[in-house]
Amino acid sequence: MSFINVIKRIFEQNIRTLTSQIQLSDNNNLVYLATSNDTKYIIKVYQNKGMYSDKEAYLLNKISNKNLRKMYYYEEKPAGIDYPISILEYIEGETLLDHVKNDLSLENAEKYTTQIFNFLQDCFEHAEDGFGCIVNDQEYSHESWQSYLFDALTNPMKDLLQYNISDLLEESFAIYFNCQQQISCENPVIVPIDLNLSNFIISKDNEVKVIDPGAIIAGDSHNAYGEFAAHTYKTLLWDCFAKNLSNDSLKRVHIYALFDDLNILSFIARHGGDVYKACPWGNPHTFIELIKLHIKEITK
């Protein structure tokens, strides 16, 4: 039986008759838009295995939140396919990135960021037993949060050493060593680490829906705030989101935002992008400008 026919069999055994099936993406996961009569679904085949595999099903099984889309079916080892598969709710709407490009209103910015903040709070309610990448329920990539952060910081440095930003790299390393108390973590929780604006859909009911939430780690909850700041700092979205945070926590958030921006910039470097001009989606500031701003806030 062919790969496509296996997917069709799984869908029809667990949902209903499949009317049509269109492939949307084959980047990291295989993603299909499936239609049964007039109802649409998303089918995902998770191709990445091991430490850095997509943990969307793990998150959806652990977390209950109105802003997460429903998962109707998941199987870790389906017959006929070497990868896990899920069948998910299809959300009609535009991405948050599209809304930002179309002049997002203050009212909607406050509403969306409150819903994103509340989604993160529900993630933080679930305690983990280790640190770093979640391999499975009992296995993690690192023995401590500090060791995970050290690797998360040093690995991007290798990709950025050839660029004329050595002063920023040196300052970032100094911040890591000088701010150990601020970035300590003894009680790890689920931490989403891909909060770019294209991973949020605004539904027809004007509600945030989180899509592709499978990039998660176990660690300090403030790292999730830093991840959002890495994409949105100095924008209306960040100004609204930051209202949920205490002044005492902001330095900690800036530290994680610094590390996250360096990580994203190294990804851009590895894939041949312009390190000096690259900006987060929906943010007019370059990553290098944001890195400088985070360092300024941390060291003032």
Image (spheres, rainbow, N blue to C red):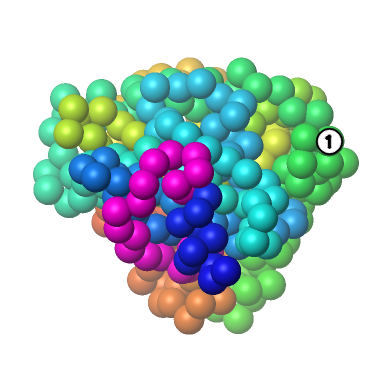
Callout 1, which amino acid? Gln
* Residue 137 can be seen, yes or no: yes
**From which residue to which does the magenta span run?**
11-30
Relative to 65, residue 27 above or below: below
Please say whether residue 22 is one of the residues in the magenta stretch: yes
- Tell which of 16 and 272 is nearer to you: 16
* Image quarter of residue 108: top left
Q: Relative to residue 288, is residue 232 drawn left or right? A: left
- Is 241 displayed left or right of 137 in the figure? left
**Rendering quarter of residue 99:** top left
Residue 112: where, in percent of width, then height? 29, 29
Which residue appears at 30% of the width and 58% of the height?
Answer: 20
Residue 230 visible, this angle? no
Residue visible at 59% across and 29% down in the picture: 61
Q: Of 111 and 222, which appears nearest the observer? A: 111
Q: Position of residue 103 (x, y in %)?
A: 12, 44
Residue 221 located left or right of residue 235: right
Quarter of the image where the N terminus is located: bottom right
Q: Residues within 10 Å of mark 1 (few under 14, many from 20)?
A: few
Magenta segment includes 222: no
Across and down, in percent, residue 209 comes to 34, 34
Choose between 65 and 297: the one closer to the eye.
Answer: 65
Does 105 sit above or below residue 114?
A: below
The residue to which callout 1 is attached is 138
The residue at the point 72 percent across, 46 percent down is 133
Residue at 65% from the left image edge and 22% from the top image edge: 126
